[in-house]
């Protein structure tokens, strides 16, 4: 099972709308070359998709859109032995967007190394975060913005905040700029998350 | 899994509150440069971090909290046993105002990098302990009043020479 989480600077409705606009996928979804809607059922659409990764993969995917906060999918015909998963959308705890949780289960068959498929799929999902943010025309509200950013949301609550478009806000990090530790070799200074040794030159 | 323990003058509840406030890791943990919570569902929290000394790019940890005695975590977007995992365990010392804090941290990437991965995790864990101790006591082992840094990182093998009060100091990046 592959799990991935990322934060999108948009509301659940916006994300859901984009993800279910199958015709537009080739414009923004990483690797997607063509999409053909085989059954335009609003609850359980059937879509044929061609994806270019290491090789060209053709799949027919059945989607299940009956739940408001998730989109389930499973391959009914295609390259993988089995392929299914879910995109779950929840308001970010800081109220500055939506957290997308992607769960994917797949069997690639005996001849295909699992590690390779995993690495490639993970890389593709990482690209999806950026692509989806670009598609929505927003920048993801980056982490480490501290409590100041949360305070700007007001008292409407995270659900209400997540339901409207999000404007990217400047990071208001209160990160400590440096940490110094005394060691036998000298002073160990951590700046930007990396250690440096500071010692007198003899 | 590499393990370190230390007695820290604080209650388990106080320490748990610090360790479970993931967004504030940037304020006390020397290796963390960004942190943000993505999901909070009961005792499970998913948070995103950047620690350049451990790995390039961001990584996502899933925390399982058991207040106030333990927090376990593992990286969720990794294949097999790769990635970062560990735990914080807190137990009150009877008859004292101190808490025994046990930290575990294991970091695994490629097989041929295991020794380096272990050294990095050991070092980060040690420094997190140092910083945690200083943070809860309201101070720092060596409290610098550093100005805005002129650099975010130095290439490995290169140095930066600084003269202060007639003494020449040299910053040397001490490896991954």
Image (spheres, rainbow, N blue to C red):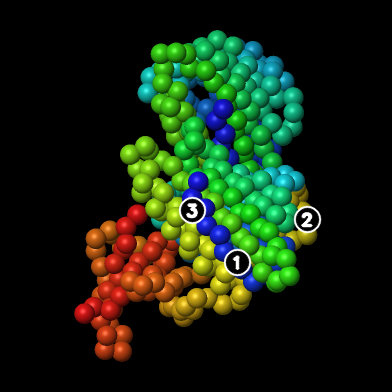
Label 3 secondary element: strand
The answer to whether residue A163 is above or below residue B132 is above
Q: Nearer the viewer, mark 1 or mark 2?
A: 1
Label 2 secondary element: loop
Mark seen at residue A156 = 2
Residue B140: x and y, percent? 52, 76
| Same-chain status of marks 3 and 1 | yes
Q: As drawn, is B98 to the left or to the right of B126?
A: right
Report the residue at 28% width, 58% height from top.
B156
Label 1 secondary element: strand
Residue A16: x and y, percent? 65, 33
Residue lying farthest top? A77
Crowding near the residue tagged with mark 2, few <14, some 14–19, many ≥20 C-alpha atoms within 10 Å: few
Residue A106: x and y, percent? 54, 21
Which residue in the protein does label 3 denote? B50
Which residue in the protein does label 1 denote? B7
Please say whether residue A32 is visible from this viewpoint: yes
**Badge 1 sits on which subunit?**
B
The quarter of the picture where residue A119 lies is top left
Q: Earlier in the sequence, mark 3 or mark 1?
A: 1
Q: What's the distance in space between the residues labelled 1 and 2, CA to CA?
A: 42 Å
């Amino acid at each position: 099972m592959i799990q991935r989480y990322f934060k999108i600077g948009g509301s659940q409705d916006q994300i859901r709308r984009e993800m279910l606009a199958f015709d537009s996928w080739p414009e923004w979804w990483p690797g997607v070359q063509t999409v053909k809607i085989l059954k335009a059922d609003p609850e359980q659409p059937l879509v044929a998709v061609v994806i270019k990764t290491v090789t060209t993969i053709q799949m027919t995917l059945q989607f299940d859109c009956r739940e408001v906060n998730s989109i389930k999918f499973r391959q009914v015909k295609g390259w993988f032995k089995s392929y299914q998963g879910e995109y779950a959308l929840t308001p970010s705890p800081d109220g500055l967007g939506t957290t997308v949780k992607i769960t994917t289960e797949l069997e690639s068959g005996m001849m295909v190394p699992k590690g390779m498929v995993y690495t490639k799929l993970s890389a593709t999902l990482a690209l999806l975060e950026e692509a989806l943010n670009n598609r929505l025309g927003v920048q993801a509200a980056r982490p480490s913005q501290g409590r100041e950013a949360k305070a700007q949301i007001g008292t409407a609550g995270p659900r209400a905040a997540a339901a409207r478009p999000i404007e990217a806000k400047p990071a208001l990090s209160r990160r400590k700029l440096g940490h110094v530790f005394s060691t036998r070799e000298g002073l160990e200074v951590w700046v930007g998350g990396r250690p440096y040794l500071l010692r007198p030159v003899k | 899994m590499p393990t370190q323990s230390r007695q820290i003058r604080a209650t388990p509840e106080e320490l748990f509150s610090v360790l479970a406030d993931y967004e504030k890791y940037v304020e006390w943990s020397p290796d963390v440069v960004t942190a943000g919570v993505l999901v909070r569902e009961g005792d499970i929290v998913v948070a995103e971090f950047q620690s350049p000394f451990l790995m390039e790019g961001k990584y996502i940890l899933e925390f399982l909290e058991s207040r106030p005695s333990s927090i376990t975590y593992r990286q969720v977007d990794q294949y097999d046993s790769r990635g970062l995992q560990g735990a914080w365990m807190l137990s009150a010392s009877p008859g004292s105002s101190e808490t025994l804090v046990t930290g575990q941290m294991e970091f695994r990437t490629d097989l041929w990098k295991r020794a380096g991965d272990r050294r990095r995790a050991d070092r980060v864990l040690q420094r997190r302990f140092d910083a945690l101790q200083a943070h809860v006591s309201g101070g720092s082992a060596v409290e610098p009043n550093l100005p805005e840094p002129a650099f975010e990182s130095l290439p490995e093998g290169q140095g930066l020479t600084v003269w202060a009060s007639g003494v020449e100091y040299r910053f040397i990046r001490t490896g991954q």
